[in-house]
């Protein structure tokens, strides 16, 4: 399979295999007009299999979302077909308005304007909890 | 500390401070009669809980303060769709401190983020109820004289009983504490509570389905209600409910100095004949609850005698 190289844009590489689509949705890439490619299960020396997303514009990628979905992922900024910057992501301490609490008894489910906020409670397990009800964030990664 | 949302907002030292004040109030309540003169406590109860509300109001009145508020959502602006944030912003102008009960988890934290005065969580759904835990802790302090080296039996509904979870959380901070978890299979302590507060902290525990078998090992027996609604069928409920009812016969198997606690209200899980046993301290427990609420109000308002 061949995907054309990007002239100016962003390549999110080393996404854990199977997480590409979720990342695509959470970053809101469906709303972009430019071409976006998701490559699933690309062979990787380091990871065995990986997903890759290529965006044909200088979209402002929310690094918190990237590292939340797939902490190993790297964000590469491409200019004139050359990678000019590699952004390594780091697991964020807080996730603000990135995911929603699924606990039906949580105050955020009845009062929509409240900021959705999760805090990192276990770095090793990559576990986040809702600051209001302490429910663990559900992610299918 | 400005608000009390979760019992762990209080350090062990702050807890000791509150207990010292509560002790002093118990000794000489007159000394405290005017501490909160000209202060107002708002009790915002989005769901009814008469006992908790009365305890807060009695606490404030005994400190010489005044109270206002509502006792259910239908009689408040929430019925018209006002957000917690808006209500709190408004009430912050009417009161010096707010005690709030809400059926949704986390509502008091939302309140705390919008309030200009201290917020006390008076219960948020099945989540936290820190002032009940304060009452429990003062009871243990007074009746047992210590927090460490105690074997604490928790009996009944350990699955949904939030007071049980908070008490475990609070007591797991002391040395030499051991838990005995007594419940039917259906109402066992949730695994995340067991993992976080007991196993991770390497605290010894015993799990049992029989109160008779373990009651003789306990320093404290904390009883909770086994509610019919928690069972899938009537049969299981009828089969199980008697094993978790405390009777005078079962009390004969207990130590002379064991104490019986209960967050109340009780239904039938403690037979009324046990009330006369000096080891039964659940009614004293409610009074301790009021004293701790008094101490807490003073601390949050930064008032001293
Ligand atoms: Zn929540």
Image (cartoon, coloured by chain):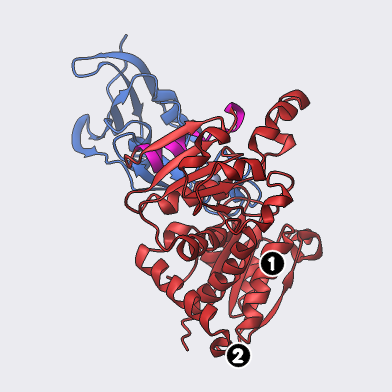
Chain colours: A blue, B red
Q: Residue at coordinates 36% horizontally, 30% vertically from top-left? A: A55
Q: Position of residue B232 (x, y in %)?
A: 72, 26
The one of B13 and B263 positioned closer to us in this rendering: B263
Q: Which residue is mark 1?
A: B53
Tell whether label 1 touches label 2 (CB within 8 Å): no
- Image quarter for ligand 1: top right
Which region of the structure is painted magenta? Answer: B185-199
Query: Visible in this render: residue B213?
Result: yes
| Residue underneath mark 2 | B37
SS of the residue at dot 1? helix
Q: Nearer the viewer, residue B45 or B182?
A: B182
Q: Quadrant of the C terminus of chain A?
A: top left
Q: Position of residue B106 (x, y in %)?
A: 56, 53
- Chain to which the residue tagged by mark 2 belongs: B
- Image height of B155 relative to B3, above or below: above
Could you tell me which residue is drawn at 36 percent across and 55 percent down? B148
Say which element carries label 2: loop
Q: Does the magenta segment cover residue B188?
A: yes
Which of the marked residues, 2 or 1, is nearer the chain's N terminus?
2
Subunit of label 1: B
- Considering the whole magenta stretch, tell me its main secondary structure: helix
Quarter that holds the N terminus of chain A? top left
Q: Is residue A126 above or below residue B140?
A: above
Q: Which mark is residue B138?
A: none
What's the distance in space between the residues labelled 2 and 1, CA to CA?
20 Å
Lateral position of residue A73 relative to residue B76, left or right: left
- Comparing B245 with B120, the one in front is B245
Circle 1 packing at 10 Å, graded few (<14), some (14-19), many (20+), is: many
């Amino acid at each position: 399979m061949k995907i054309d190289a990007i002239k100016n844009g962003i390549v999110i590489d080393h996404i854990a295999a199977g997480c590409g689509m979720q990342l695509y949705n959470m970053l809101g890439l469906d709303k972009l007009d430019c071409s976006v490619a998701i490559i699933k299960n690309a062979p990787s020396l380091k990871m065995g299999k990986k997903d890759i997303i290529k965006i044909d514009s200088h979209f402002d990628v929310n690094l918190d979302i990237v590292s939340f979905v797939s902490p190993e992922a790297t964000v590469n900024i491409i200019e004139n077909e050359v990678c000019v910057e590699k952004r390594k992501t780091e697991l964020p301490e807080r996730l603000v308005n990135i995911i929603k609490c699924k606990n039906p008894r949580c105050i955020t489910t009845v009062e929509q304007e409240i900021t959705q906020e999760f805090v990192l409670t276990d770095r090793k397990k990559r576990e986040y909890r809702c600051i209001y009800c302490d429910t663990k964030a559900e992610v299918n990664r | 500390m400005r608000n009390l949302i979760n019992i762990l907002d209080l350090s062990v030292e702050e807890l000791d401070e509150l207990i010292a004040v509560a002790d002093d109030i118990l000794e000489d309540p007159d000394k405290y009669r005017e501490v909160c003169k000209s202060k107002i406590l708002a009790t915002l109860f989005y769901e009814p809980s008469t006992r908790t509300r009365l305890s807060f109001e009695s606490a404030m009145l005994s400190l010489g303060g005044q109270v206002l508020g509502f006792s259910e959502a239908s009689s408040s602006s929430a019925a018209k769709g006002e957000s917690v944030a808006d209500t709190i912003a408004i009430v912050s102008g009417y009161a010096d401190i707010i005690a709030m009960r809400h059926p949704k988890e986390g509502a008091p934290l939302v309140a705390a983020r919008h309030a200009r005065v201290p917020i006390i969580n008076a219960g948020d759904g099945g989540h936290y109820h820190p002032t009940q835990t304060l009452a429990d802790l003062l009871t243990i302090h007074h009746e047992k004289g210590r927090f460490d080296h105690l074997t604490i039996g928790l009996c009944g509904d350990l699955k949904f009983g939030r007071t049980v979870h908070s008490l475990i959380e609070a007591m797991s901070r002391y040395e030499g504490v051991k838990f005995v978890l007594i419940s039917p299979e259906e109402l066992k302590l949730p695994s995340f509570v067991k993992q976080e507060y007991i196993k991770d902290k390497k605290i010894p525990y015993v799990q049992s389905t029989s109160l008779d078998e373990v009651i003789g090992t306990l320093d404290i027996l904390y009883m909770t209600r086994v509610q019919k609604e928690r069972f899938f069928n009537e049969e299981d409920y009828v089969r199980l409910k008697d094993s978790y009812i405390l009777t005078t016969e079962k009390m004969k198997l207990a130590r002379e100095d064991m104490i019986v606690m209960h967050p109340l209200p009780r239904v039938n899980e403690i037979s009324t004949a046990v009330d006369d046993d000096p080891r039964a301290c659940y009614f004293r427990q409610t009074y301790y609850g009021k004293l701790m609420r008094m101490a807490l109000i003073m601390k949050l308002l930064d008032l001293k005698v």
